[in-house]
Amino acid sequence: MLILQNISYIHPNKDLLFDNINLAVNNHDKIALIGNNGSGKSTLLKIIASELQLSGGQLSVDTKPYYVPQIFGQYNHLTVAQALRIENKVNALKEILNGNVTEENYTFLDDDWTIEDRCNNALDYWQLKDLDLSKKMETLSGGQKTKVFLAGISIHEPELVLLDEPSNHLDISGRQLLYDFIQSTQSTLIAVSHDRKLLNLLNTVCELSKRGITVYGGNYDFFTEQKQIESNALNQELQSKEKALRKAKEKERETLERQQKLDSRGKKKQEKAGVARIMMNTLRNNAENSTSKMKSVHTEKIGSVSQELQELRSSLPDIDKMKFGFDNSALHKGKILFTANDLNFSYDTQPLWTENLNFKITSGERIALKGKNGSGKTTLIKLILGNIEPQTGTVYRADNKSVYIDQDYSLIDDKLKVYEQAEQFNTSALQEHEIKIRLNRFLFTKEDWDKSCNALSGGEKMRLMLCCLTINNQSPDIIILDEPTNNLDIQNIEILTRAINEYRGTLIVVSHDETFLEQTNIERTIQL
């Protein structure tokens, strides 16, 4: 069992990341830990894994967790065996079998006589057959590194497994192995992921936010239904408060107008009755005081309702505050943009594709490029864009305006500030205040305009890229997205999905995220 009590974490720069985190995880629970980028999900996993020290509170865990990290750079200098923490055991077993029977080797082995078999079986399962354990991690692809750490689960057989974005870098077959494992394992799981298919395999969703951890007893679909109910209730309350504010202002106006009429009528009567001037001044002052008190009461009421309204609006999800407004592509639907005839490309002498490619792309289509890691998806994108030319076959490219958004958001210049980056796309000569309005629509407030693009998260860079596309005087004819949901939190994936669904040009997507492909209405697939 895992228990978190009043957990807090402060960054080395003294910034508070989260505070008062409470959570109880029972044996065999399968938990999805979700939250916006920067909320502290990965940090919390590292604390549970003893990779980081908590700043306050208490952590109680009755077993040693097994941790699958999101980022592998710190392991590049290690061998596969060292990364899996089995080097000493494997070497000791080999030494004993070769006749070097020493106390030291027996100590390292710790009676784990099946370590080699478990290791081979685990690597085979994760499509890493015949992987040399002495191979350096830096020589492996991102997908292979992920599979190495996933294989470690079967090798170490832990009771508690911590997964940080485990489906990143995995192709479709690798993801399916991961889904099968999650469904079949008896281990307790805590997974941080943006992969909605994976999240739906877990029976509890824990949302990490500024308010702490909120537990939802169901899978991700159940969570989204509950959030929608909460959102609907919030919007109803907003409408109610807005109506109350309008009524309060109208009541104030009517009351003051009525009071002013009464005061005026009373003054005329007093003048007609010949009331003395000194008495008239007294009566006038009383009337003014009465009006002032009345106005004060209404102002207080209006202020109270306005404050409540402001608090409610601040509770709205960021996505509900956003406005997109893409212009339409200049091309008519159905125009042939690209034709491949017996297309192929070679690195060295080996053709990339076993069969030459033949296909057409027409304007307005929504196409997915699919294939295993190393199947040539990026090469095909370069051919479509005209960055390289085919070595076999011919291509036709119509004049078009295309944008390629890669995993690193290379179109964003890290040397520029946010406003300067937006200005780079201002081909329609928008005024400064108009650009800033667009930035605000994409949640870049006044405090963000002078922020360096280098300091932006993946989700922020994606939002800035989308904003830049709306600033441009004409939407691109083709948008190409390369694994667009990698490293994005669910909120930013929803933002991207909503924006893409408003876009009316040609869309080409490289993605293993089946939910994203489904929600963006992909019409056909080019399989490599």
Image (spheres, grey):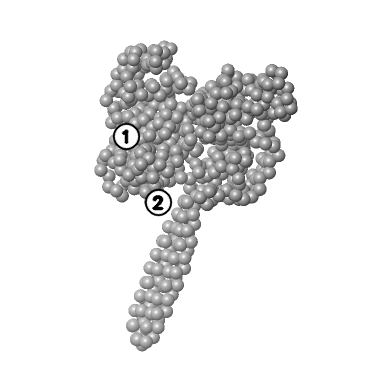
Q: Which of the two discs, 1 and 2, labels the residue nearer the N terminus?
A: 2
Q: Secondary structure at mark 2?
A: helix
Does the residue at mark 1 contact the one at mark 2 (Cβ under 8 Å)?
A: no
Query: Image check: 326 left or right of 113?
Result: left
Q: Is residue 286 above or below residue 127?
A: below
**As rendered, which of 404 and 222 lies closer to the eye?**
404
Q: Determine the image quadrant of residue 67.
A: top right
Name which residue type carries label 1.
Ser
Residue in view at x 38 percent, y 21 percent: 380
Name which residue type carries label 2.
Glu
Residue in view at x 53 percent, y 48 percent: 11
Task: Bin the neighbour count of mark 1 within 10 Å (Cα to Cα): few under 14, some 14-19, many 20 and up.
Answer: many
x, y (%) of residue 461? 41, 39
Q: Is residue 128 above or below residue 18?
A: above
**Residue 497 visible to the viewer:** yes
**Residue 334 visible to the viewer:** no
Query: Image check: 187 left or right of 207?
Result: right
Q: Determine the image quadrant of residue 132.
A: top right
Residue furthest to the left = 429
The residue beneath circle 2 is 447
**As rendered, which of 501 and 487 lies closer to the eye?**
487
x, y (%) of residue 363? 33, 25
